[in-house]
Image (spheres, rainbow, N blue to C red):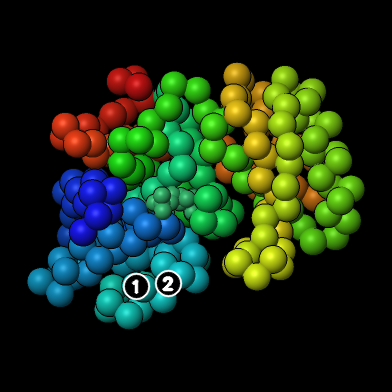
């Protein structure tokens, strides 16, 4: 296994220790979450009883293929724990998510859980959020106009940088599981994530953004020198 994948898998394995019998779990999306679902499936085969709500069609398919019991969020009700990856983990466990385009369902599921635990390789830890482009999910009506309004709102919140409509490998607009589009905001540095989140959320046409603030309570970060479990006060 490539070294980077090995670190993701180690973080996933450590987070699995937080799972106990009978839990209702949110399952994240992305390559790190994928490791978690694989390891969870091994435990399910050994007899662990869990009910899981996937945050994307991709994770849903993986869970079905591996025999992990799944439910819709409405069927499952409040969740005990949500385990998900992140694109950046900043101070206070503020996150940028949505690199895989699943931010809307990910945020709904994280909010429905009593606890959100982030799993990542240690390179995702940053002193200031923003090096990773901020994904903003928007409706597919008037996207050029939404993009201009978004640029204004971002500037008023003290940030700047080019915006780009996300495209898939064929050059078509990337469409999310909920049928929306994504505008990636290349900001470099987000000095005030709370202010930016408020500004972006107010733009008509914005469905959700990838700033996850006050949602994660722990982060399991795996580096070459070991694994650390951070909470909001320790980072
Ligand atoms: O937010 C996400 C998907 O929308 C992912 O959790 C994020 O992109 C991290 O992915 P990976 O574990 O592959 O680095």
Element at badge 1? helix
Residue 171 in percent (x, y) is at 69, 66
Whether tag 1 and tag 2 are in contact, CB under 8 A, the answer is: yes
Cα distance, mark 1 to mark 2?
A: 5 Å
Kindly identify which numbered label has been placed on residue 63: 1
Work out whether residue 134 can be spotted.
yes
In this rendering, is residue 218 above or below 206? above
Q: Residue at x 83, y 31 (%)?
A: 152
Badge 1 density bin: few <14, some 14–19, many ≥20, Cα 10 Å: many
Q: Is mark 2 within 8 Å of ligand 1?
A: no
Badge 2 density bin: few <14, some 14–19, many ≥20, Cα 10 Å: many
Kindly identify which numbered label has been placed on residue 35: none
Q: Residue at x 43, y 44 (%)?
A: 86
Q: Which quarter of the image is occupied by the N terminus?
A: bottom left
Q: Residue at x 16, y 34 (%)?
A: 226
Work out whether residue 214 can be spotted.
no
Residue 149 in percent (x, y) is at 85, 39
- In this rendering, the count of numbered labels is 2
Element at badge 2? helix
Q: Is residue 88 left or right of residue 223?
A: right
Q: Which residue is mark 2?
A: 60
Give the quadrant of residue 216: top left
Q: Residue at x 28, y 59 (%)?
A: 35
């Amino acid at each position: 296994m490539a070294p980077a994948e090995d670190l993701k898998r180690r973080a996933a394995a450590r987070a699995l220790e937080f799972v106990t019998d009978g839990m209702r779990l949110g399952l994240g999306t992305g390559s790190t979450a994928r490791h978690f679902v694989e390891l969870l499936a091994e435990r399910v085969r050994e007899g662990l009883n869990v009910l899981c709500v996937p945050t994307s069609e991709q994770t849903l398919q993986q869970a079905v293929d591996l025999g992990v019991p799944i439910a819709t969020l409405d069927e499952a009700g409040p969740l005990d724990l949500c385990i998900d990856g992140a694109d950046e983990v900043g101070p206070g466990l503020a996150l940028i998510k949505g690199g895989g385009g699943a931010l809307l369902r990910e945020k709904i599921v994280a909010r429905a859980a009593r606890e959100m635990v982030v799993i990542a390789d240690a390179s995702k830890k940053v002193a200031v959020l923003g090096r990773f482009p901020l994904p903003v999910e928007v409706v597919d009506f008037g996207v050029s106009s939404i993009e201009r309004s978004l640029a204004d709102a971002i500037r008023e919140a003290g940030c700047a940088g080019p915006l780009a409509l996300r495209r898939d490998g064929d050059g078509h607009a990337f469409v999310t599981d909920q049928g929306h589009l994504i505008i990636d905001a290349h900001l470099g540095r987000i000095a005030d994530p709370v202010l930016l989140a408020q500004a972006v959320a107010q733009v008509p046409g914005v469905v959700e953004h990838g700033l996850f603030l006050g949602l994660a309570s722990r982060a399991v970060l795996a580096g070459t020198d070991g694994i650390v479990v951070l909470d909001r006060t320790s980072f």
